[in-house]
Image (cartoon, rainbow, N blue to C red):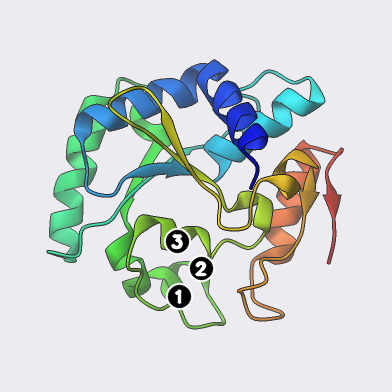
Amino acid sequence: MTDALEARLAEIVRATPTTWAVLRTARELDLPDWMIFSGAVYQPVWNHLTGRPLDYGIKDYDLAYHDASDISYEAEDVVIKRVAAAFEPPLRDLVEVRNQARVHLWFADKFGADEPYPPLETSAAALKRFVATAFCVGVRLETDDSLTVHAPFGLEDLFALRLRPNPLRPSGAGGWERTTGSAKARWSEISIEP
């Protein structure tokens, strides 16, 4: 990952009004090991590169945190309610917060996964599970207003408008067709490499 691409990503994220607002509020909530990831980060980049409004196509804002001290749903629900109270409508319904320490408990049932989903040690570890390398990006707004970027496969595919399968996922793992098809329907400029 190059510093130049990280700087471009940070500039685009800062210029995306809703993503920036979510980051600022998330920072105030001070959840353990938190970040915003996936569509709220990569979609503004594609929008910038293709001349669309920066918020175009963003369906939700994934706010991840990692707290292994209590992985019960009840503990996560307390955080979900706290996060919801921090946002005004319509963001209240668009910010989806999940404790990454408990994703392994429900992922297969929710998504019909055909592969094991081991417990995650950090929020950044979740990025290694997304179907395409360009989707594997997250950012965290620090107290000094700098952005920490997490991108285990770099940012090159993201800025090249290229979807490639995540090499860490098993060959033929579920979700590829649905996810890439949805992206291609909204951004015809992207290329998809099977």
Is disc 2 in contact with disc 1, using a CB cutoff of under 8 Å? yes
Disc 3, SS: helix
Q: Earlier in the sequence, mark 1 or mark 3?
A: 1
Amino acid residing under circle 2: Phe
Disc nearest the viewer among 1 and 3:
3
Query: Horizontal placement of 45 versus 105: left or right?
Result: right
Q: Amino acid at mark 3?
A: Ala
Q: Residue 85 at x, y = what percent?
A: 20, 29
State the CA–CA distance, disc 1 to disc 3: 14 Å
Viewer-nearest residue: 11 or 100: 11
Determine the image quadrant of residue 130.
bottom right
The x, y position of residue 11, in whole percent, is: 58, 22
Residue at 43% across, 63% down? 125
Label whose residue precedes the other's in the sequence (3 or 2)? 2
Residue ranking furthest to the front? 3
Q: Return the residue at label 2.
A: 111
Q: Which residue is mark 1?
A: 108
In the rendered view, tell whether residue 157 sits above or below residue 105: above
Whether the residues at callouts 3 and 2 have beta carbons within 8 Å, the answer is no
Residue 95 location (% of width, % of height): 38, 36
Is residue 90 at all visible to an observer of this figure? no
Which sits in the foreground, 135 or 172?
135
User: Quadrant location of residue 42?
Assistant: top right
**Dot 1, crowdedness within 10 Å: few (<14), some or many (≥20)?**
some
In 3D space, how far apart are the residues under numbered discs 3 and 2 (Cα atoms)? 15 Å
Whether residue 115 is visible, yes or no, is yes
Query: Three-letter amino acid code at disc 1?
Result: Ala
Q: Secondary structure at mark 2?
A: helix
Q: What label sits on residue 126 in the rendered view?
A: 3
Residue 109 versus residue 78 in the image, above or below: below
